[in-house]
Amino acid sequence: QVQLVESGGGLVQAGGSLRLSCTTNGRTFTIYNMGWFRQARGKEREFVAAISWSGSSTHYADSVKGRFTISRDSAKNTVYLQMNSLKPEDTAIYYCAADPRTTVVSSDRQWYDYWGQGTQVTVSS
């Protein structure tokens, strides 16, 4: 089974920063597109950011564009989500996910076959 483990969540004040990490199997990380999704209490899970298997392409939700940056480190089998200028509305459980395709990077969660357990991000006003 593909394993994805998120870390780095926590409580921060509005305007602060956090960096989330997602560790994966080496094989998975090498050939899979990777994405971050989030789900606030009482709301649907929504797309946040994605990065292609090669790292050459990225895609962001409009709500986080310019504030969040997704990246990956092949040597560490890890994908990151750097979150700056955090807002209370960013409060959610953040999930790492893997898309087995090696073509286009997608915001459609149906393409992501593997998911981590999530890490809580709370932004206070």
Image: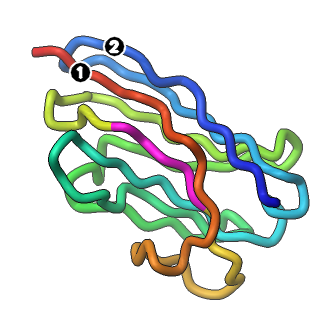
Q: Residues within 10 Å of mark 2 (few under 14, many from 20)?
A: some
**For the stretch drawn in magenta, what is the main secondary structure?**
strand
Q: Position of residue 27 (x, y in %)?
A: 89, 62
Q: Nearer the viewer, residue 36 or 71?
A: 36
Picture residue at 65% right of the left edge, 41% below the top: 22
The C terminus sits in image quarter: top left
Residue 76 located left or right of residue 45: right
Q: Residues within 10 Å of mark 1 (few under 14, many from 20)?
A: some
- Residue located beneath label 1 in the image: 123
Q: Are marks 1 and 2 in contact (CB under 8 Å)?
A: yes
- Its colouring scheme is rainbow
Q: Position of residue 37 (x, y in %)?
A: 41, 54
- Magenta stretch, residue numbers: 93-97
Picture residue at 43% right of the left edge, 72% below the top: 109
Secondary element type, mark 1: strand
- Which amino acid type is shown beneath numbered disc 2? Leu
Q: Position of residue 23 (x, y in %)?
A: 73, 41
Picture residue at 42% right of the left edge, 41% below the top: 94
Which of the 4 quarters of the picture holds residue 7? Answer: top right
- Residue located beneath label 2 in the image: 11
Q: Is residue 113 above or below residue 22?
A: below
Q: Position of residue 87 (x, y in %)?
A: 18, 30
Q: Is residue 94 magenta?
A: yes
Q: Is residue 91 above or below residue 22?
A: above
Q: Residue furthest left?
A: 125
The N terminus sits in image quarter: bottom right
- Which amino acid type is shown beneath numbered disc 1? Val
Q: Is residue 56 magenta?
A: no
Residue 46 located left or right of residue 77: left
